[in-house]
Image (cartoon, coloured by chain):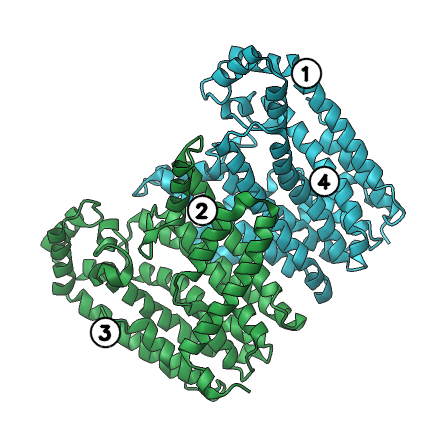
Chain colours: A cyan, B green
């Protein structure tokens, strides 16, 4: 059995990183054996995967596994870390879908391959080459996620037991992405609808399903843990998304890796913006209508919008809702069916996911 | 045991279609239960999957399975038909990557969603909404492929046995797509390099790997069949790709679903074009350089290019190579390790894949 001091979040994150590194290096070798032209693909995916990342989803999967009382092994780390590659697919494709040119302060994958095209004086459109490469790299990440799980050398019955959740998590991810895009396209201002998007994008895909996946893979009566993990994951996901909404408006670029106020420029339909709209006076609504979603916002415009969000009380209400939802999540896991170490880690994860300084 | 009269290609194709229909209808129900906004996604994927398609890859998987002497069942049909959904992902993403606006004579998925955006007067860019939708639908098809295999109710050891090939097939697909795109970007005129792309895109992904997948899923010493299926699949894939190259230049639009001479307008670097380049006089090369890859080619220009391909002897050489490669493929499967019915079906498949009228 693991000694308790190895079950800290930083130690678990290190093990996730080691598993991902070992997998990607072996698979990159396979990829470049198909053709040396694939070296830029292998390098870009490896860089994207390893350069940073909070590893939230693998950590939730690991804690979901530990909650059953099962013991960790290198094989289990490898199987559970595979969810990070699903996330890599989502991020790479998201940047193409949103036409976002940077990710964590570096060029997005499509911009990286666009630059490669230009540098090599390839024929055809550099922009199109960038987009096409990013689509393929995202696809490859999704295939690699499955491959990493399948090759993890855990017992066959553990693989079989985890596949339904692994699949549903991905269907829900794609569905959530479409719903989000659809909301933006509808220019929806409904708090209720925005919360549903948050539920799929963050609650289910990032927290609940990774927890279920870990429990399913442990293959020891996972069904009794599913509702408990849902009761933790869904509210925590909403709280996490609200914190993310606040960072997108009030966070500084050093922290978010994106320009300050980026969500305001992008016109992102978040729960906090829907709250602002509900609480705003007609004069404030007119200002929002004029400025929100304009690519050429000045720092003064951003300050104007931020002030409206504060003055309407939407910021305070979002902060209050984060607290309520986090408390609800934490209360759910105080349950003897969940191992004490997992309860402790879930508590820490809830703090990290929602209490990031604004 | 199946009576032999049920093991005809049309009967097998009907069973593939029934399996795909049953799966997609059940999963569409699940998808729209997440949100009614997903109805256009469900409808578009169902239409794309069921409206047409030769089902080459599922048929090769089924024949690969039958070659081991194992018997078919509805569960096995369902498991093996899943490869068609991998192909749906490839086609949807391919059309975005190639900026192809039609597929089988209908709007490509990204154009379909672009039109939906316009019709509903959504906010934001209709073109970008179309592209983003197509990326998500392709991703969803890839996830559904895995889900269809996992849910097929075949024995767990059959699933476990088939997963490595299922994964490698997809890695090779993505790798082949990147190599193809890279060749186009390099404006390569090398026959050898074009053949390698054909080997990955058609030989391995469309024929060899589906055959291996079927054999692996039968889970009866598949290893002894792998090299035989490779010796059939690789040359047949090259022959199939050559026939496709010829159709892209000489085929009529009723047959290909694309405008006549489309590959000439697109400047597609095919094996036949590489042969033409090798065999051309300097005057012919100058004409190719002037016309090949121009979007505004007139019917007369297309005739000029076609005449060069014929006059250099490249067309005849491609035809000859198709015959040689097909003979090589057929010779490989005359092997007692392969069941007689599978030998018969593989012979028919080789004829269908390569002898389509030009």
Question: Which percent across, then down, holds residue A253?
Answer: 58, 23
Q: Earlier in the sequence, mark 2 or mark 3?
A: 2
Q: Position of residue A190 (x, y in %)?
A: 59, 29
Between the C-alphas of marks 4 and 3, the distance is 63 Å
Disc 2 target residue: B134
- SS at circle 2: helix
Chain that bears disc 4: A
How many marks on residues? 4
**Disc 3 designates what residue?**
B320
Residue placed under numbered mark 1 in the picture: A313
Of tags 4 and 3, the one toward the viewer is: 4
Q: Residue at x 48, y 59 (%)?
A: B86
Q: Is residue B264 visible?
A: yes
Q: Whole-Å distance between the Cαs marked 4 and 2?
A: 28 Å
Mark 3 neighbour class, 10 Å CA radius: few under 14, some 14 to 19, many 20 or more: few
Q: Quadrant of residue B126?
A: top left
Tell me the tag on residue A234. 4
Q: Secondary structure at mark 4?
A: helix
Quadrant location, the N terminus of chain A: bottom right
Closer to the eye: label 1 or 3: 1
Q: Residue at x 47, y 56 (%)?
A: B46
Which residue, as the protein is rendered here, is positioned at the far right? A336
């Amino acid at each position: 059995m693991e000694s308790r001091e190895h079950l800290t979040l930083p130690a678990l994150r290190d093990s996730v990183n080691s598993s991902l590194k070992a997998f990607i290096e072996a698979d990159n070798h396979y990829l470049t054996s198909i053709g040396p032209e694939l070296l830029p693909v292998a390098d870009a995916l490896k860089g994207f995967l390893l350069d940073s990342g909070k590893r939230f989803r693998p950590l939730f999967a690991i804690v979901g596994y530990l909650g059953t009382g099962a013991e960790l092994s290198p094989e289990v780390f490898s199987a559970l870390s595979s969810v990070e590659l699903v996330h890599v697919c989502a991020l790479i494709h998201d940047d193409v879908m949103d036409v976002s040119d940077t990710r964590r302060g570096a060029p997005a994958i499509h911009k990286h391959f666009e630059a490669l095209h230009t540098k090599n004086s390839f024929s055809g459109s550099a922009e199109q080459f960038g987009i096409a490469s990013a689509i393929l790299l995202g696809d490859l990440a999704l295939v690699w996620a499955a491959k990493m799980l399948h090759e993890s050398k855990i017992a066959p019955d553990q693989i079989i037991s985890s596949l339904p959740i692994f699949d549903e998590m991905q269907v829900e991810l794609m569905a959530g992405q479409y719903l989000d895009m659809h909301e933006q396209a509808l220019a929806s201002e409904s708090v209720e609808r925005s919360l549903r998007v948050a539920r799929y994008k963050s609650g289910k895909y990032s927290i609940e399903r990774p927890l279920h996946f870990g429990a399913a893979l442990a293959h020891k009566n996972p069904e009794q843990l599913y509702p408990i993990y849902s009761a933790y994951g869904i509210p925590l996901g909403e709280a996490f998304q609200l914190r993310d909404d606040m960072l997108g408006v009030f966070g500084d670029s050093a922290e978010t890796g994106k320009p300050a106020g980026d969500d305001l420029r992008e016109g992102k339909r978040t729960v906090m913006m829907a709250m602002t709209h509900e609480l705003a006076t007609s004069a404030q609504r007119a200002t929002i209508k004029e400025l929100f979603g304009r690519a050429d916002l000045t720092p003064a415009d951003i300050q104007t919008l931020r002030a409206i969000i504060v003055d309407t009380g939407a910021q305070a209400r979002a902060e209050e809702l984060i607290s309520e939802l986090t408390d609800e999540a934490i209360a759910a896991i105080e349950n003897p069916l969940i191992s004490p170490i997992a309860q402790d880690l879930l508590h820490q994860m809830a703090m990290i996911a929602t209490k990031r300084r604004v």
